[in-house]
Amino acid sequence: MAKKETKYIFVVGGVMSSVGKGIAASSIGKILQSRGYAIANLKADMYVNLDAGTIRPAEHGEVFVGEDGVEADQDLGNYERFTNQISTRENYVTTGQIYAEVIRRERNLEYEGEDVEVYPDIPKEIIRRIEVCQKKSEAEIMVIEYGGTVGEYQLLPFLEAARMMKSKKHADVFVVLISYLPTPALLGEQKSKPTQHAVTDLYSVGLNPDFVICRSERPATDDIKRTISNVCSLPIERIISAPDIYSIYDVPVNFEKENFGAILLKTMGLPTRKKDLADWTALAAKIKTINKEVKIGIVGKYFNFKSCKDTYISVIESINHASWGLNHKPNVIWLDSEKYEKDRSKLKELQDLDGIIVPGGFGKRGTEGMILAANYARENKIPYFGLCLGMQIMTISYARNVLGLSDANSTEMDSDTKNPVIATMADQVEKIKNKNYGATMRLGAYPCLLKDGSVAALAYGKKSISERHRHRYEVNNAYIEPLEKAGFVFSGSSPDGRLMEIAELSKNEHPFYLGTQFHPEFKSRPLTPHPLFYAFVKACISKKK
Ligand code: GLN
Protein backbone atom coordinates (compact mmCIF):
# COMPACT_ATOMS: atom_id res chain seq x y z
CA MET A 1 0.00 0.00 0.00
CA ALA A 2 1.25 3.49 -0.82
CA LYS A 3 2.50 5.52 2.13
CA LYS A 4 -0.13 7.96 3.30
CA GLU A 5 0.81 11.56 2.68
CA THR A 6 1.12 13.86 5.67
CA LYS A 7 -1.45 16.62 5.82
CA TYR A 8 -0.45 20.18 6.64
CA ILE A 9 -2.88 22.65 8.18
CA PHE A 10 -1.69 26.26 8.23
CA VAL A 11 -3.41 28.37 10.87
CA VAL A 12 -3.21 32.06 10.05
CA GLY A 13 -4.80 35.09 11.65
CA GLY A 14 -6.84 37.77 9.97
CA VAL A 15 -8.21 41.18 11.06
CA MET A 16 -6.32 41.44 14.33
CA SER A 17 -4.06 39.61 16.76
CA SER A 18 -4.89 38.28 20.24
CA VAL A 19 -8.13 36.57 19.25
CA GLY A 20 -6.95 33.15 20.37
CA LYS A 21 -5.07 31.75 17.40
CA GLY A 22 -2.89 29.67 19.72
CA ILE A 23 -5.90 28.17 21.47
CA ALA A 24 -7.56 27.50 18.11
CA ALA A 25 -4.41 25.77 16.79
CA SER A 26 -4.14 23.74 20.03
CA SER A 27 -7.81 22.82 19.78
CA ILE A 28 -7.48 21.71 16.16
CA GLY A 29 -4.59 19.49 17.29
CA LYS A 30 -6.72 18.22 20.16
CA ILE A 31 -9.81 17.28 18.13
CA LEU A 32 -7.75 15.52 15.46
CA GLN A 33 -5.80 13.67 18.13
CA SER A 34 -9.04 12.70 19.84
CA ARG A 35 -9.99 10.98 16.57
CA GLY A 36 -6.87 8.87 16.68
CA TYR A 37 -4.49 10.85 14.47
CA ALA A 38 -0.83 11.46 15.26
CA ILE A 39 -0.49 15.22 15.24
CA ALA A 40 2.20 17.80 15.84
CA ASN A 41 1.78 21.51 16.44
CA LEU A 42 4.39 23.94 15.20
CA LYS A 43 4.60 27.66 15.91
CA ALA A 44 6.33 30.05 13.55
CA ASP A 45 6.99 33.51 14.94
CA MET A 46 7.83 36.46 12.78
CA TYR A 47 10.48 38.09 14.91
CA VAL A 48 14.19 38.07 14.16
CA ASN A 49 15.04 36.83 17.66
CA LEU A 50 16.44 33.30 17.54
CA ASP A 51 14.13 32.33 20.38
CA ALA A 52 11.86 33.93 22.97
CA GLY A 53 14.51 33.73 25.69
CA THR A 54 15.72 37.28 25.39
CA ILE A 55 12.33 38.96 25.08
CA ARG A 56 10.95 40.85 28.07
CA PRO A 57 8.04 38.87 29.57
CA ALA A 58 5.79 41.91 29.94
CA GLU A 59 6.36 42.53 26.22
CA HIS A 60 5.93 39.08 24.77
CA GLY A 61 4.42 36.96 27.52
CA GLU A 62 5.83 33.90 29.19
CA VAL A 63 8.87 32.13 27.82
CA PHE A 64 7.83 28.50 27.65
CA VAL A 65 10.63 25.98 28.23
CA GLY A 66 10.59 22.58 26.54
CA GLU A 67 12.09 19.32 27.78
CA ASP A 68 15.10 19.91 25.52
CA GLY A 69 15.52 23.44 26.87
CA VAL A 70 14.01 25.36 23.97
CA GLU A 71 12.93 28.83 25.10
CA ALA A 72 9.80 29.28 23.09
CA ASP A 73 6.64 31.21 22.58
CA GLN A 74 3.91 30.59 25.14
CA ASP A 75 1.78 28.87 22.50
CA LEU A 76 3.95 25.79 22.84
CA GLY A 77 2.60 25.64 26.39
CA ASN A 78 -0.94 25.70 25.06
CA TYR A 79 -0.11 22.90 22.63
CA GLU A 80 1.30 20.77 25.45
CA ARG A 81 -1.62 21.46 27.76
CA PHE A 82 -4.15 20.57 25.07
CA THR A 83 -2.49 17.63 23.35
CA ASN A 84 0.00 16.44 25.96
CA GLN A 85 2.59 16.18 23.19
CA ILE A 86 6.05 17.26 24.31
CA SER A 87 7.31 20.20 22.27
CA THR A 88 10.97 20.52 21.38
CA ARG A 89 12.99 23.01 19.34
CA GLU A 90 11.67 21.39 16.16
CA ASN A 91 8.21 22.71 17.05
CA TYR A 92 9.29 26.33 17.13
CA VAL A 93 10.55 28.45 14.24
CA THR A 94 11.42 32.15 14.02
CA THR A 95 12.47 34.40 11.16
CA GLY A 96 15.83 34.68 12.93
CA GLN A 97 16.35 30.90 12.89
CA ILE A 98 15.46 30.73 9.19
CA TYR A 99 17.91 33.46 8.21
CA ALA A 100 20.64 32.13 10.52
CA GLU A 101 20.46 28.72 8.86
CA VAL A 102 20.39 30.10 5.32
CA ILE A 103 23.40 32.31 6.08
CA ARG A 104 25.23 29.44 7.75
CA ARG A 105 24.74 27.32 4.66
CA GLU A 106 25.84 30.16 2.38
CA ARG A 107 29.07 30.51 4.39
CA ASN A 108 29.64 26.77 3.94
CA LEU A 109 29.33 27.09 0.17
CA GLU A 110 26.28 24.88 0.29
CA TYR A 111 24.55 27.02 -2.35
CA GLU A 112 27.42 26.11 -4.69
CA GLY A 113 28.11 29.59 -5.93
CA GLU A 114 24.50 30.59 -6.58
CA ASP A 115 23.30 33.88 -5.20
CA VAL A 116 21.07 33.36 -2.21
CA GLU A 117 17.72 35.14 -2.43
CA VAL A 118 14.94 35.99 -0.02
CA TYR A 119 12.75 34.29 -2.61
CA PRO A 120 12.86 31.29 -2.88
CA ASP A 121 15.60 30.44 -0.37
CA ILE A 122 13.86 31.78 2.72
CA PRO A 123 10.49 30.04 2.10
CA LYS A 124 12.38 26.87 1.14
CA GLU A 125 14.10 26.86 4.50
CA ILE A 126 10.73 27.40 6.22
CA ILE A 127 9.39 24.35 4.38
CA ARG A 128 12.46 22.35 5.36
CA ARG A 129 11.83 23.22 9.02
CA ILE A 130 8.21 22.13 8.79
CA GLU A 131 9.35 18.83 7.29
CA VAL A 132 12.00 18.35 9.98
CA CYS A 133 9.29 18.70 12.62
CA GLN A 134 7.05 16.28 10.76
CA LYS A 135 9.81 13.67 10.53
CA LYS A 136 10.79 13.94 14.15
CA SER A 137 7.21 13.79 15.41
CA GLU A 138 6.04 11.28 12.80
CA ALA A 139 2.85 13.30 12.64
CA GLU A 140 0.16 12.32 10.19
CA ILE A 141 -1.23 15.82 10.45
CA MET A 142 0.83 18.92 11.14
CA VAL A 143 -0.86 22.01 12.55
CA ILE A 144 1.33 25.00 11.73
CA GLU A 145 0.43 28.24 13.44
CA TYR A 146 1.77 31.49 12.04
CA GLY A 147 2.19 34.41 14.44
CA GLY A 148 0.91 37.81 13.33
CA THR A 149 -1.92 38.51 10.88
CA VAL A 150 -2.20 38.32 7.10
CA GLY A 151 -1.25 41.54 5.43
CA GLU A 152 1.82 41.95 7.61
CA TYR A 153 5.06 42.40 5.72
CA GLN A 154 7.09 39.99 7.82
CA LEU A 155 4.58 37.18 7.34
CA LEU A 156 5.06 37.13 3.55
CA PRO A 157 7.91 34.55 3.34
CA PHE A 158 5.90 32.24 5.60
CA LEU A 159 2.74 32.57 3.53
CA GLU A 160 4.87 31.99 0.45
CA ALA A 161 6.16 28.78 2.05
CA ALA A 162 2.57 27.61 2.48
CA ARG A 163 1.79 28.53 -1.12
CA MET A 164 4.87 26.71 -2.44
CA MET A 165 3.91 23.63 -0.46
CA LYS A 166 0.37 23.85 -1.71
CA SER A 167 1.45 24.12 -5.34
CA LYS A 168 3.39 20.87 -4.94
CA LYS A 169 1.04 18.94 -2.71
CA HIS A 170 -2.27 20.42 -3.51
CA ALA A 171 -4.30 17.71 -1.82
CA ASP A 172 -2.33 17.82 1.41
CA VAL A 173 -2.10 21.50 2.32
CA PHE A 174 -4.92 23.41 3.97
CA VAL A 175 -5.38 26.91 5.31
CA VAL A 176 -7.48 27.83 8.31
CA LEU A 177 -8.11 31.54 8.73
CA ILE A 178 -8.86 32.68 12.26
CA SER A 179 -10.75 35.88 11.88
CA TYR A 180 -12.63 38.30 14.05
CA LEU A 181 -16.18 39.57 13.67
CA PRO A 182 -16.59 42.90 15.41
CA THR A 183 -19.99 43.89 16.78
CA PRO A 184 -19.98 47.70 16.90
CA ALA A 185 -22.01 48.80 19.93
CA LEU A 186 -23.73 51.38 17.77
CA LEU A 187 -25.14 48.72 15.47
CA GLY A 188 -25.38 45.75 17.77
CA GLU A 189 -24.79 43.35 14.90
CA GLN A 190 -21.80 41.37 13.66
CA LYS A 191 -19.88 42.71 10.71
CA SER A 192 -18.00 40.54 8.25
CA LYS A 193 -16.23 43.20 6.18
CA PRO A 194 -12.87 43.01 8.03
CA THR A 195 -12.91 39.23 7.49
CA GLN A 196 -13.63 39.75 3.80
CA HIS A 197 -10.55 41.97 3.64
CA ALA A 198 -8.44 39.35 5.40
CA VAL A 199 -9.59 36.79 2.82
CA THR A 200 -8.63 39.21 0.03
CA ASP A 201 -5.19 39.58 1.64
CA LEU A 202 -4.81 35.81 1.52
CA TYR A 203 -5.89 35.71 -2.15
CA SER A 204 -3.27 38.35 -2.95
CA VAL A 205 -0.51 35.95 -1.86
CA GLY A 206 -1.97 33.06 -3.79
CA LEU A 207 -3.75 31.32 -0.94
CA ASN A 208 -7.38 30.78 -0.19
CA PRO A 209 -8.81 29.67 3.11
CA ASP A 210 -10.23 26.16 3.37
CA PHE A 211 -11.88 27.08 6.65
CA VAL A 212 -12.72 30.34 8.38
CA ILE A 213 -13.01 30.34 12.15
CA CYS A 214 -15.05 33.32 13.23
CA ARG A 215 -14.03 34.65 16.63
CA SER A 216 -16.57 36.97 18.18
CA GLU A 217 -18.37 37.68 21.42
CA ARG A 218 -21.48 35.82 20.21
CA PRO A 219 -21.86 32.86 17.85
CA ALA A 220 -21.62 33.80 14.18
CA THR A 221 -25.10 34.25 12.73
CA ASP A 222 -26.22 32.18 9.75
CA ASP A 223 -26.34 35.36 7.66
CA ILE A 224 -22.74 36.13 8.44
CA LYS A 225 -21.68 32.55 7.78
CA ARG A 226 -23.42 32.69 4.42
CA THR A 227 -21.74 35.96 3.47
CA ILE A 228 -18.31 34.66 4.37
CA SER A 229 -18.86 31.33 2.67
CA ASN A 230 -19.84 33.27 -0.46
CA VAL A 231 -16.77 35.49 -0.40
CA CYS A 232 -14.49 32.48 0.09
CA SER A 233 -16.36 30.18 -2.29
CA LEU A 234 -16.60 27.66 0.52
CA PRO A 235 -19.49 25.46 1.66
CA ILE A 236 -21.14 27.04 4.68
CA GLU A 237 -20.15 24.11 6.92
CA ARG A 238 -16.54 25.28 6.60
CA ILE A 239 -17.31 28.56 8.33
CA ILE A 240 -16.86 27.76 12.01
CA SER A 241 -18.37 29.83 14.76
CA ALA A 242 -16.06 30.47 17.72
CA PRO A 243 -17.77 32.72 20.24
CA ASP A 244 -16.23 33.77 23.57
CA ILE A 245 -16.52 30.89 25.99
CA TYR A 246 -16.22 30.28 29.72
CA SER A 247 -12.76 28.74 29.62
CA ILE A 248 -10.21 28.01 26.90
CA TYR A 249 -10.81 24.30 27.49
CA ASP A 250 -14.26 24.75 25.99
CA VAL A 251 -12.82 25.54 22.58
CA PRO A 252 -12.29 21.95 21.36
CA VAL A 253 -15.73 21.06 22.70
CA ASN A 254 -17.24 23.99 20.89
CA PHE A 255 -15.41 23.07 17.68
CA GLU A 256 -16.92 19.63 17.88
CA LYS A 257 -20.37 21.16 18.38
CA GLU A 258 -19.79 22.73 14.98
CA ASN A 259 -18.72 19.27 13.78
CA PHE A 260 -15.36 20.77 12.86
CA GLY A 261 -13.34 17.58 13.44
CA ALA A 262 -15.35 15.49 11.01
CA ILE A 263 -15.61 18.23 8.37
CA LEU A 264 -11.88 18.93 8.60
CA LEU A 265 -11.02 15.26 8.14
CA LYS A 266 -13.52 14.89 5.32
CA THR A 267 -11.99 17.91 3.59
CA MET A 268 -8.53 16.38 3.95
CA GLY A 269 -9.80 13.11 2.54
CA LEU A 270 -9.20 11.21 5.76
CA PRO A 271 -11.57 8.85 7.63
CA THR A 272 -13.43 10.75 10.35
CA ARG A 273 -13.13 7.99 12.99
CA LYS A 274 -14.90 7.99 16.33
CA LYS A 275 -13.88 10.76 18.69
CA ASP A 276 -12.77 10.29 22.25
CA LEU A 277 -13.19 13.61 23.98
CA ALA A 278 -15.30 12.47 26.93
CA ASP A 279 -12.91 13.26 29.82
CA TRP A 280 -12.05 16.60 28.33
CA THR A 281 -15.70 17.51 27.73
CA ALA A 282 -16.56 16.47 31.28
CA LEU A 283 -13.82 18.70 32.69
CA ALA A 284 -14.87 21.67 30.55
CA ALA A 285 -18.43 21.20 31.82
CA LYS A 286 -17.40 20.72 35.45
CA ILE A 287 -15.36 23.94 35.50
CA LYS A 288 -18.54 25.94 35.01
CA THR A 289 -20.33 24.37 37.94
CA ILE A 290 -17.67 24.97 40.59
CA ASN A 291 -18.42 27.84 42.91
CA LYS A 292 -16.30 27.36 46.05
CA GLU A 293 -13.45 29.77 45.69
CA VAL A 294 -9.77 29.65 46.57
CA LYS A 295 -7.94 32.97 46.56
CA ILE A 296 -4.31 32.90 45.48
CA GLY A 297 -2.00 35.89 45.17
CA ILE A 298 0.83 36.08 42.67
CA VAL A 299 3.54 38.34 44.06
CA GLY A 300 5.44 39.23 40.91
CA LYS A 301 6.73 42.14 38.94
CA TYR A 302 5.93 41.68 35.28
CA PHE A 303 2.68 43.53 35.25
CA ASN A 304 1.21 45.93 32.78
CA PHE A 305 -2.31 46.66 31.70
CA LYS A 306 -2.50 43.93 29.12
CA SER A 307 -0.18 41.12 29.81
CA CYS A 308 -0.02 39.75 33.36
CA LYS A 309 -2.14 36.82 32.21
CA ASP A 310 0.26 36.16 29.34
CA THR A 311 3.35 36.66 31.44
CA TYR A 312 2.40 34.00 33.94
CA ILE A 313 0.17 31.85 31.76
CA SER A 314 1.59 28.44 32.73
CA VAL A 315 1.49 29.39 36.41
CA ILE A 316 -2.13 30.48 36.12
CA GLU A 317 -3.11 27.38 34.20
CA SER A 318 -1.38 25.20 36.79
CA ILE A 319 -3.35 26.94 39.54
CA ASN A 320 -6.50 26.36 37.49
CA HIS A 321 -5.83 22.65 36.94
CA ALA A 322 -5.08 21.97 40.61
CA SER A 323 -8.02 24.05 41.86
CA TRP A 324 -10.47 22.35 39.52
CA GLY A 325 -9.07 18.99 40.56
CA LEU A 326 -9.93 19.99 44.12
CA ASN A 327 -13.36 21.30 43.09
CA HIS A 328 -12.50 24.92 43.67
CA LYS A 329 -12.62 27.96 41.49
CA PRO A 330 -9.37 29.90 41.60
CA ASN A 331 -9.45 33.61 42.17
CA VAL A 332 -6.01 34.86 41.21
CA ILE A 333 -4.97 38.23 42.58
CA TRP A 334 -2.09 40.24 41.08
CA LEU A 335 0.26 41.74 43.63
CA ASP A 336 3.08 43.97 42.51
CA SER A 337 5.94 43.22 44.89
CA GLU A 338 7.34 46.75 44.62
CA LYS A 339 4.49 48.15 46.69
CA TYR A 340 5.71 46.25 49.76
CA GLU A 341 9.10 47.93 49.40
CA LYS A 342 7.46 51.33 49.48
CA ASP A 343 5.05 50.55 52.29
CA ARG A 344 5.48 47.47 54.47
CA SER A 345 2.09 47.90 56.09
CA LYS A 346 0.61 46.72 52.76
CA LEU A 347 1.90 43.22 53.54
CA LYS A 348 -1.15 42.81 55.77
CA GLU A 349 -3.28 42.32 52.66
CA LEU A 350 -1.62 38.89 52.26
CA GLN A 351 -3.65 37.81 55.28
CA ASP A 352 -6.80 37.84 53.11
CA LEU A 353 -5.35 35.30 50.72
CA ASP A 354 -5.42 31.53 50.99
CA GLY A 355 -1.90 31.31 49.63
CA ILE A 356 0.75 33.11 47.64
CA ILE A 357 3.04 32.24 44.78
CA VAL A 358 6.28 34.01 43.98
CA PRO A 359 6.95 33.10 40.36
CA GLY A 360 10.08 33.27 38.21
CA GLY A 361 11.85 36.48 37.39
CA PHE A 362 15.10 38.18 36.56
CA GLY A 363 17.01 41.17 37.91
CA LYS A 364 16.88 43.11 41.13
CA ARG A 365 13.73 45.17 40.67
CA GLY A 366 10.97 44.09 43.01
CA THR A 367 12.93 41.36 44.77
CA GLU A 368 13.09 43.14 48.15
CA GLY A 369 9.28 43.22 48.16
CA MET A 370 9.17 39.51 47.34
CA ILE A 371 11.59 38.78 50.20
CA LEU A 372 9.30 40.70 52.57
CA ALA A 373 6.27 38.78 51.30
CA ALA A 374 8.06 35.44 51.72
CA ASN A 375 8.91 36.31 55.30
CA TYR A 376 5.37 37.47 56.01
CA ALA A 377 3.97 34.23 54.61
CA ARG A 378 6.37 32.20 56.77
CA GLU A 379 5.60 34.08 59.98
CA ASN A 380 1.87 34.11 59.39
CA LYS A 381 1.60 30.53 58.15
CA ILE A 382 0.20 31.51 54.78
CA PRO A 383 0.86 28.76 52.21
CA TYR A 384 3.78 29.83 50.03
CA PHE A 385 4.96 28.35 46.76
CA GLY A 386 8.13 29.67 45.14
CA LEU A 387 8.89 28.96 41.50
CA CYS A 388 12.54 29.29 40.54
CA LEU A 389 13.19 32.90 41.62
CA GLY A 390 10.53 32.28 44.28
CA MET A 391 12.66 29.48 45.75
CA GLN A 392 15.73 31.72 45.78
CA ILE A 393 13.65 34.45 47.44
CA MET A 394 12.47 32.17 50.26
CA THR A 395 16.06 31.05 50.84
CA ILE A 396 17.31 34.64 51.09
CA SER A 397 14.39 35.51 53.36
CA TYR A 398 15.15 32.56 55.66
CA ALA A 399 18.86 33.40 55.78
CA ARG A 400 18.10 37.01 56.68
CA ASN A 401 15.33 36.48 59.18
CA VAL A 402 16.10 33.14 60.81
CA LEU A 403 19.87 32.77 60.40
CA GLY A 404 20.29 36.46 61.13
CA LEU A 405 22.39 37.15 58.03
CA SER A 406 20.71 40.49 57.43
CA ASP A 407 22.69 41.17 54.25
CA ALA A 408 22.07 37.76 52.67
CA ASN A 409 21.26 38.07 49.00
CA SER A 410 21.67 36.60 45.55
CA THR A 411 24.66 37.67 43.48
CA GLU A 412 22.12 38.47 40.77
CA MET A 413 20.75 41.29 42.96
CA ASP A 414 23.95 42.35 44.67
CA SER A 415 27.21 41.09 43.22
CA ASP A 416 29.14 42.28 46.29
CA THR A 417 26.92 40.77 48.97
CA LYS A 418 28.85 39.40 51.96
CA ASN A 419 26.43 36.50 52.22
CA PRO A 420 25.65 35.18 48.75
CA VAL A 421 23.21 32.45 49.76
CA ILE A 422 22.22 32.36 46.11
CA ALA A 423 25.25 32.42 43.87
CA THR A 424 26.09 32.43 40.19
CA MET A 425 26.29 28.87 38.84
CA ALA A 426 29.91 28.02 38.06
CA ASP A 427 29.35 27.58 34.33
CA GLN A 428 27.54 30.93 34.11
CA VAL A 429 30.36 33.19 35.32
CA GLU A 430 32.17 33.45 31.97
CA LYS A 431 28.91 33.69 30.03
CA ILE A 432 27.72 36.64 32.11
CA LYS A 433 31.15 38.32 31.83
CA ASN A 434 31.05 38.02 28.04
CA LYS A 435 27.38 39.08 27.85
CA ASN A 436 26.67 35.74 26.22
CA TYR A 437 23.03 35.72 27.27
CA GLY A 438 21.07 33.94 24.52
CA ALA A 439 20.05 30.33 25.29
CA THR A 440 22.90 29.95 27.79
CA MET A 441 21.02 29.42 31.07
CA ARG A 442 20.65 26.02 32.69
CA LEU A 443 17.73 24.99 30.49
CA GLY A 444 15.35 22.10 30.11
CA ALA A 445 14.68 18.86 31.94
CA TYR A 446 16.98 17.51 34.63
CA PRO A 447 16.43 14.67 37.09
CA CYS A 448 15.97 15.34 40.78
CA LEU A 449 15.92 13.04 43.80
CA LEU A 450 13.55 13.69 46.70
CA LYS A 451 14.16 13.28 50.41
CA ASP A 452 12.07 10.54 52.03
CA GLY A 453 9.09 11.79 53.96
CA SER A 454 9.46 15.38 52.72
CA VAL A 455 6.49 17.51 51.69
CA ALA A 456 7.75 17.26 48.10
CA ALA A 457 8.15 13.46 48.17
CA LEU A 458 4.67 13.05 49.63
CA ALA A 459 3.18 15.30 46.98
CA TYR A 460 4.85 13.47 44.10
CA GLY A 461 4.38 10.04 45.63
CA LYS A 462 7.77 8.99 44.29
CA LYS A 463 11.45 9.60 44.88
CA SER A 464 12.79 10.41 41.48
CA ILE A 465 11.39 13.16 39.27
CA SER A 466 12.34 15.22 36.24
CA GLU A 467 11.45 18.88 35.81
CA ARG A 468 12.32 21.78 33.50
CA HIS A 469 14.72 24.54 34.40
CA ARG A 470 15.64 28.04 33.33
CA HIS A 471 18.12 29.81 35.59
CA ARG A 472 21.68 31.09 36.05
CA TYR A 473 21.85 31.20 39.84
CA GLU A 474 21.58 28.49 42.48
CA VAL A 475 21.69 27.85 46.20
CA ASN A 476 25.24 28.38 47.41
CA ASN A 477 26.36 25.06 48.90
CA ALA A 478 28.40 26.87 51.58
CA TYR A 479 25.11 27.85 53.23
CA ILE A 480 23.33 24.50 53.13
CA GLU A 481 24.55 23.37 56.52
CA PRO A 482 23.74 26.53 58.49
CA LEU A 483 20.37 26.81 56.76
CA GLU A 484 19.47 23.18 57.48
CA LYS A 485 20.61 23.52 61.10
CA ALA A 486 18.17 26.40 61.38
CA GLY A 487 15.29 24.22 60.14
CA PHE A 488 15.33 24.88 56.40
CA VAL A 489 15.03 21.61 54.47
CA PHE A 490 16.52 20.92 51.07
CA SER A 491 14.22 18.13 50.02
CA GLY A 492 15.22 17.75 46.39
CA SER A 493 18.61 17.76 44.73
CA SER A 494 20.35 16.72 41.55
CA PRO A 495 21.31 13.02 41.63
CA ASP A 496 24.96 13.93 42.38
CA GLY A 497 23.71 15.96 45.36
CA ARG A 498 25.36 19.16 44.18
CA LEU A 499 22.41 21.27 43.08
CA MET A 500 19.60 22.10 45.47
CA GLU A 501 16.34 21.77 43.55
CA ILE A 502 13.65 22.01 46.24
CA ALA A 503 13.55 23.84 49.58
CA GLU A 504 10.80 23.51 52.15
CA LEU A 505 9.80 23.80 55.78
CA SER A 506 8.51 20.67 57.47
CA LYS A 507 4.76 20.21 57.92
CA ASN A 508 5.18 20.84 61.68
CA GLU A 509 6.67 24.25 60.99
CA HIS A 510 4.35 25.50 58.32
CA PRO A 511 1.23 24.33 56.44
CA PHE A 512 3.05 24.71 53.09
CA TYR A 513 6.28 26.57 52.53
CA LEU A 514 8.05 25.18 49.51
CA GLY A 515 10.05 26.40 46.56
CA THR A 516 11.50 24.75 43.50
CA GLN A 517 14.55 25.75 41.49
CA PHE A 518 12.73 24.31 38.49
CA HIS A 519 9.47 25.38 36.86
CA PRO A 520 6.79 22.80 37.66
CA GLU A 521 4.22 24.96 35.87
CA PHE A 522 5.40 23.71 32.47
CA LYS A 523 4.20 20.18 33.14
CA SER A 524 0.72 20.66 34.57
CA ARG A 525 -2.16 19.43 32.41
CA PRO A 526 -5.89 20.11 32.80
CA LEU A 527 -6.72 16.47 33.50
CA THR A 528 -3.54 15.74 35.45
CA PRO A 529 -2.68 18.71 37.67
CA HIS A 530 0.92 19.02 38.76
CA PRO A 531 1.47 17.28 42.14
CA LEU A 532 3.14 20.30 43.76
CA PHE A 533 0.44 22.72 42.62
CA TYR A 534 -2.11 20.22 43.84
CA ALA A 535 -0.47 20.00 47.27
CA PHE A 536 -0.14 23.78 47.44
CA VAL A 537 -3.77 24.49 46.52
CA LYS A 538 -4.87 21.79 48.96
CA ALA A 539 -2.98 23.63 51.70
CA CYS A 540 -4.60 26.90 50.59
CA ILE A 541 -8.06 25.32 50.85
CA SER A 542 -7.23 24.02 54.36
CA LYS A 543 -6.10 27.47 55.46
CA LYS A 544 -9.39 28.87 54.25
CA LYS A 545 -11.24 26.44 56.49
N1 GLN B 1 16.85 34.99 37.99
C1 GLN B 1 16.98 33.71 38.62
C2 GLN B 1 18.08 32.89 37.99
O1 GLN B 1 18.47 33.15 36.88
C3 GLN B 1 15.67 32.95 38.58
C4 GLN B 1 15.28 32.56 37.19
C5 GLN B 1 13.82 32.21 37.05
O2 GLN B 1 13.00 32.53 37.88
N2 GLN B 1 13.48 31.56 35.97
O3 GLN B 1 18.57 31.98 38.60
Image (cartoon, rainbow, N blue to C red):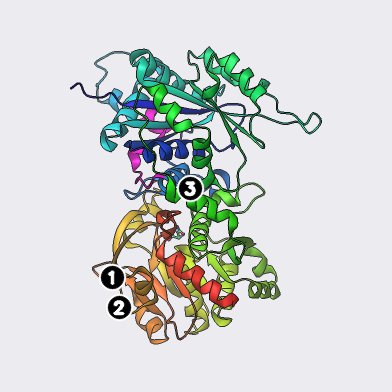
Label 1 vs 3, first from the N-terminus: 3
Q: State the SS at label 1.
A: loop
Report the side of 64 relative to 225 (left or right): left
Q: Earlier in the sequence, mark 2 or mark 1?
A: 2
Q: Residue under circle 3?
A: 281
The answer to which image quadrant residue 468 occupies is bottom left
Which residue is denoted by mark 2 in the rendering? 452
Q: Quadrant of ligand 1?
A: bottom left
Residue visible at 37% across and 39% down in the picture: 33
Query: Looking at this rendering, what residue extends furthest in the front direction?
Result: 274
> Mark 3 belongs to which amino acid?
Thr
| Residue 360, above or below 404 | above
Residue numbers of the magenta segment = 83-103
What amino acid is found at the position of numbered circle 1 in the picture? Lys
x then y, percent, for residue 261: 44, 32
Please, which residue is most extreme toward the right here?
186
- Depth-wise, is mark 1 or mark 3 nearer the camera? 3
Residue picked out by circle 1: 463
Residue 293 visible from this viewpoint = yes
Q: Is residue 367 above or below residue 15?
A: below
Can residue 237 be found in the magenta stretch?
A: no
Toward the viewer: 166 or 328?
Answer: 328
